[in-house]
Image (cartoon, rainbow, N blue to C red):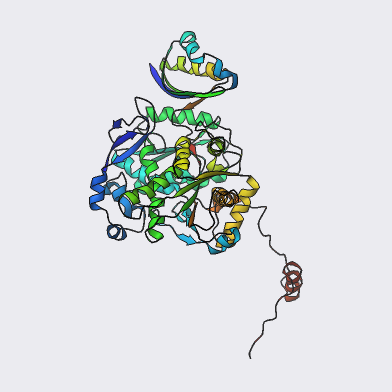
């Protein structure tokens, strides 16, 4: 049985039943799932969690889903890597990488879609839908296939064929909308009101967003039941960023970890940085922008949760960064070369943002820090293809190899045998 | 009859124009403001529009032509 009790407006506090609703009827503020905290408190323990499955469902007591409706692709419980080599490169004492490239469809979207699709099933929906240019569509298509549900994915008409493949293989209905991203936004918002479909990030968005909290739960558990002092996370809509913080707060509230402040630092690409711009201008009014960056997975020009992300930064004495596209590529390369993790462009934004946060004093290099890597690099391979190591051409002879190798790498070391 | 919930974002001179007042006069559409924050050269208004579907579409096209950005209340829904 879920401990979710209702949906509550984040602005005016009005309560609504646990239905496919996302906006408060009174003030049009966003709705968020509310829980029976006493009920959770009476049941949840570290031991109970540790006995659970090695996936996000070990935290089911904290999620708005009944166990009978779970759509299970074994999402979550991704590695938390101690990144000593990257820490040294950045001049840090203790850095951890939460590697969410290891999810079933290779991005953190599996967490939110796992919760949204499960709740959608509980609400009686037969169809999952989304508007997406990549990761979200991949995850919705995969979860619909797993659940035996229909999937409908809306894409902008000019999306590259390669981006569609990761969804098309699961055989969803793909609708290519002839128009701008804004046209797709409007069409899908209208459809969410008119069709009995679960649009994962529209009419079931309150449930969808809850999945991101599992990132914080896992990090706290993997750190040995403690919160990090600092977090660097990418920001698109700002939802992930706020929910990570909420996750740490909840673990503290339930006594699963000690009370300690977690400083939240956001990372955006300069070509789409409405939240960072507002932060730097010391305003909570976010001015929408037209995205122009290689970090497509963060290219949300009008972020729905930007205001709440700013509040989270302020409340936690955090900060916000914006990095250029060349810095994004550098970030991807640093992470790959130092830690063996190939991230998509959003990961490059996070690592470059971490470096900027250290340089600007927003991150203390001596404190425990976790950087969130939210998607796998093969999704955006084109961003780095011209910047990576090129093969050394040789003929199939030892002499050709040694000549070419000496020229590229330096004289080879002799291999001694015997004593 | 149809209902649309949208967010208008005003920048620069568009802030000074009584756009929402004019929508109610120029079109058979009822406007109902629910939230707003307007500064000297920037502001946003979240509102509901009631009326015939096509009339709402015409009104929104007119507002957009005035230089006002129009978004769904949920923000951008196209995600990566």
Against B10, is A375 above or below? below
Q: Which of A290 and A389 is in front in this view?
A: A290
Q: Where is residue A192 in the image (x, y as percent from the top left)?
A: 40, 31
Q: Quadrant of the C terminus of chain A?
A: bottom right
Q: Where is residue A375 in the image (x, y as percent from the top left)?
A: 50, 51
Can residue A174 be spotted in the picture?
no
The quarter of the displayed image where residue B4 is located: top left
Can residue A255 be spotted in the picture?
yes
Q: Residue at left 46%, top 11%?
A: B24
Which residue occupies the extreme bottom position in the image? Answer: A419
> In the image, A61: left or right of A237?
left
Q: Which of A12 and A141 is in front in this view?
A: A12
Against A345, is A417 above or below? below
Q: Which of A374 and A397 is in front in this view?
A: A374
Q: Position of residue A182 (x, y in %)?
A: 53, 30
Which residue occupies the extreme top position in the image? Answer: B25
Q: Where is residue B64 in the image (x, y as percent from the top left)?
A: 55, 20
Against A66, is B35 above or below? above
> How many labels were placed on the picture?
0
Q: Residue at left 55%, top 36%?
A: A274
> In the image, A346: left or right of A389?
left
> In the image, A335: left or right of A26?
right
Q: Nearer the viewer, residue A242 or A64?
A: A242
């Amino acid at each position: 049985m879920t401990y979710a009790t209702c949906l509550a407006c984040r602005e005016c506090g009005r309560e609504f039943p646990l239905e496919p609703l996302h906006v408060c009827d009174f003030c049009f503020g966003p709705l968020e799932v509310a829980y029976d905290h006493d009920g959770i408190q009476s049941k949840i323990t570290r031991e109970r969690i540790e006995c659970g499955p090695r996936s996000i469902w070990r935290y089911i007591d904290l999620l708005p889903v009944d166990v009978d409706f779970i759509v299970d692709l074994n999402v979550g419980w991704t590695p938390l890597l101690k990144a000593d080599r990257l820490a040294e490169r950045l001049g840090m004492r203790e850095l951890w990488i939460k590697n969410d490239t290891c999810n079933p469809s290779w991005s953190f979207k599996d967490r939110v879609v796992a919760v949204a699709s499960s709740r959608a099933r509980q609400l009686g929906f037969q169809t999952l839908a989304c508007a997406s240019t990549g990761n979200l569509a991949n995850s919705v298509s995969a979860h619909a296939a797993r659940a035996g549900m229909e999937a409908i994915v809306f894409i902008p008409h000019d999306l590259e064929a390669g981006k569609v493949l990761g969804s098309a293989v699961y055989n969803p209905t793909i609708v290519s909308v002839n128009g701008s991203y804004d046209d797709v936004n409007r069409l899908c918002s209208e459809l969410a009101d008119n069709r009995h479909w679960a649009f994962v990030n529209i009419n079931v968005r309150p449930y969808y967003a809850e999945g991101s909290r599992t990132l914080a739960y896992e990090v706290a558990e993997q750190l040995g039941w403690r919160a990090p002092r600092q977090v660097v996370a990418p920001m698109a809509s700002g939802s992930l960023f706020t929910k990570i913080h909420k996750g740490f707060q909840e673990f503290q509230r339930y006594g699963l970890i000690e009370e300690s402040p977690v400083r939240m630092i956001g990372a955006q690409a300069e070509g789409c940085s409405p939240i960072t711009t507002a932060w730097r201008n010391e305003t909570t009014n976010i001015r929408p922008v037209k995205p122009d960056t290689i970090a497509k997975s963060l290219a949300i020009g009008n972020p729905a949760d930007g205001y709440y992300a700013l509040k989270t930064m302020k409340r936690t004495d955090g900060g916000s960064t914006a990095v250029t596209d060349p810095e994004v590529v550098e970030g991807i390369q640093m992470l790959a070369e130092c830690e063996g993790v190939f991230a998509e462009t959003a990961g490059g934004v996070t690592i470059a943002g971490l470096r900027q946060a250290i340089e600007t004093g927003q991150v203390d290099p001596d404190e425990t820090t976790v950087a969130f890597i939210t998607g796998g690099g093969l999704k955006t391979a084109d961003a780095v293809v011209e910047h990576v190591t090129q093969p050394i051409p040789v003929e199939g002879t030892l002499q050709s190899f040694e000549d070419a190798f000496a020229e590229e790498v330096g004289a080879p070391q002799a291999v001694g045998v015997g004593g | 009859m149809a209902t649309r919930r949208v967010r208008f974002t005003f920048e620069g001179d568009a802030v000074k124009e009584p756009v929402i007042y004019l929508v109610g006069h120029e079109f058979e559409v009822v406007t109902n403001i629910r939230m707003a924050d307007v500064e000297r050269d920037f502001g946003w208004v979240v509102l509901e529009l009631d009326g015939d579907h096509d009339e709402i579409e015409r009104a929104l096209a007119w507002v957009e032509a005035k230089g006002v950005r129009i978004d769904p209340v949920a923000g951008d829904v196209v995600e990566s």
